Amino acid sequence: AVGQKCRRDDILLHLVEMHYKRGDYDLIRATFRARGDVLEVMPAYEEDFAYRIDMSWWIFIAAGGVALLIALVTISLMAIKAAVTNPVKSLRSE
């Protein structure tokens, strides 16, 4: 649908599932190429028409930010857990 938001990886996976091949040089029938944030698809039923999909740069920044946030929360929780744990209990169990 027009205006539908999808992840880039989901689109590429769906194209591969539909037996499209990745072609980085020439676009022929049933191929696609991904260059940076631009995805170009040549449909299997068309010979001289290709779709061009531009991905916004902020999507990649947002994904990196979410990954960084998850890493910081995980490391912080593990550090707090290590700081609160009684070392005597750890030494007795070893």
Image (tube, grey):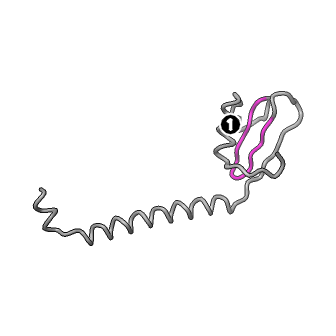
Circle 1: residue type? His
Please, is residue 10 above or below residue 63 in the view?
above
Quadrant of res 84: bottom left
Q: What residue is drawn where x is 67% and y is 40%?
A: 12
Q: Secondary structure at mark 1?
A: helix
Question: With 37 as the anchor, is 64 left or right in this view?
Answer: left
- From the top left corner, tell me how far across and down residue 94 is, in percent: 12, 56
Please, is residue 10 above or below residue 57 in the view?
above
Magenta stretch holds residue 17 = no
Q: Tell me the magenta residue range.
A: 30-42
> What quarter of the picture does the N terminus occupy?
top right
Q: What residue is drawn where x is 67% and y is 48%?
A: 8
Please, is residue 46 above or below residue 8 in the view?
above
Please, is residue 5 above or below residue 22 in the view?
below
- From the top left corner, tell me how far across and down residue 10 is, in percent: 65, 43
Magenta stretch holds residue 32 = yes
- From the top left corner, tell me how far across and down residue 43 is, in percent: 81, 33
- From the top left corner, tell me how far across and down residue 86 is, in percent: 19, 69
- Few, some or many residues within 10 Å of mark 1 (<14, 14–19, 20+): few
Looking at this view, name the residue that lies furthest to the right: 48
What residue did someone put label 1 on?
A: 14
Q: What residue is drawn where x is 84% and y is 48%?
A: 2
Q: What residue is drawn where x is 68% and y is 51%?
A: 36
Q: Which SS does the magenta portion mostly show?
A: strand
> How many numbered marks appear?
1
